[in-house]
Amino acid sequence: MPELPDVEGFRRVAQAAAGREVEDVVVNDSQVLRGVRPQEFRKALRGKEFGTPWRHGKWLVIPVGAEFPEVLLHFGMTGRMLWCGRDDEPHKHDRVVFRFADGELRYRDMRKLTGLHLARRQSDLDAQLGELGPDAMAASAADYRERLTRTKRGVKAALMDQEVLAGLGNLTVDETLWQARIHPARSTGDLSAPELSKLSRRAHTVLRQSAKVAHVPDRPSWLTGHRDEPDPHCPRCSTALERTKTAGRTTFHCPNCQPLDNS
């Protein structure tokens, strides 16, 4: 499932289209368009120049023309962006294709759980992004501290909530909590100031390093490098990792490095 680092990679892919005029828009599957008909979508973009794409959390935004409209893309569980040559073989899951003189920007998605929105004005943009918390990679340590302690609940559940901090997902949260030595079920109300500070530092490290490669890397020294093994063990202390359900998601943690009772 694409998380912030993946979408940051998609932003870099979309950057290839910045400054280029849209020659045509091919909608192969209208089910991925949200709140706009294919003809309207095509008419709003043809002949317009794509601007510099930007990201907030798991959302990618591509400005078109001077101000509006803007194309908003969410990638659900299986979406991705690709820059392809005009003569490259089409893929059966290429749902929308933006054509330019020297290439194509393709929105490819197998499961079609989310899709593309057209924001014609600021209120349309706010309707999609307005309830999100600060971008998790741009948020300050103070943002993490203030937003995580607004309510008392499990820290993983809080971190996964896009209205708290936007962009974190299952892999980035498990990796962050493991690096910070915090149990995923610990209550946000029980975290000390030093723990909250460490959590924000580790989150920024995980996100920055993952964003460089556009995914959470399975490094041997990271939890992510071991979670899919048949018999996973902690790369820090060699304790067998525990697999549980937290916040409705499969969760891995080290019972030795991340004790639930931190007293």
Image (cartoon, helix red, strand yellow):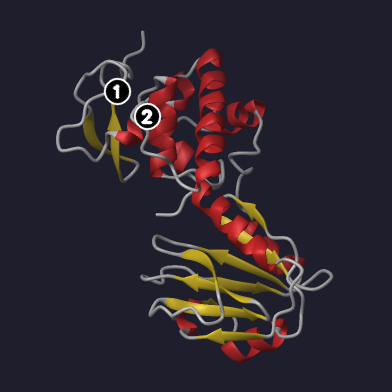
Query: Where, quadrant-wise, is the C terminus in this rendering?
Result: top left
Image coordinates for residue 192, horizontal then vertical, percent: 51, 15
The number of discs equals 2
146 lies above or below 119: above
Corner quadrant of residue 67: bottom right
Tell me the residue at 49%/51% (across/down).
6
Q: Earlier in the sequence, mark 1 or mark 2?
A: 2
**Numbered tag placed on residue 183 in the rendering:** none
Residue at the extreme left of the image, as rendered: 231
- Mark 2 lies on residue: 222
Looking at the picture, which amino acid does disc 1 mark?
Pro
Q: Nearer the viewer, residue 94 or 68?
A: 94
Name the residue carrying label 1. 235
Where residue 49 appears, as percent x and y from the top left, is 77, 75
Q: Are marks 1 and 2 in contact (CB under 8 Å)?
A: yes
The one nearer the camera, 154 or 140, is 140
| Label 1 Cα neighbours within 10 Å, binned few <14 / some 14-19 / many ≥20 | some
Q: Residue at x 70, y 80 (%)?
A: 22
User: What amino acid type should be assigned to the residue bearing mark 2?
Assistant: Trp
73 horizontally vs 189: left or right: right
Q: Residues within 10 Å of mark 2 (few under 14, many from 20)?
A: some
Q: Quadrant of residue 63?
A: bottom right
Image x and y of residue 169, in percent: 44, 45
Task: Residue at the far right: name it.
Answer: 66
Query: Relative to residue 229, is residue 206 drawn left or right?
Result: right
Whether 59 is drawn above or below 68: the answer is above
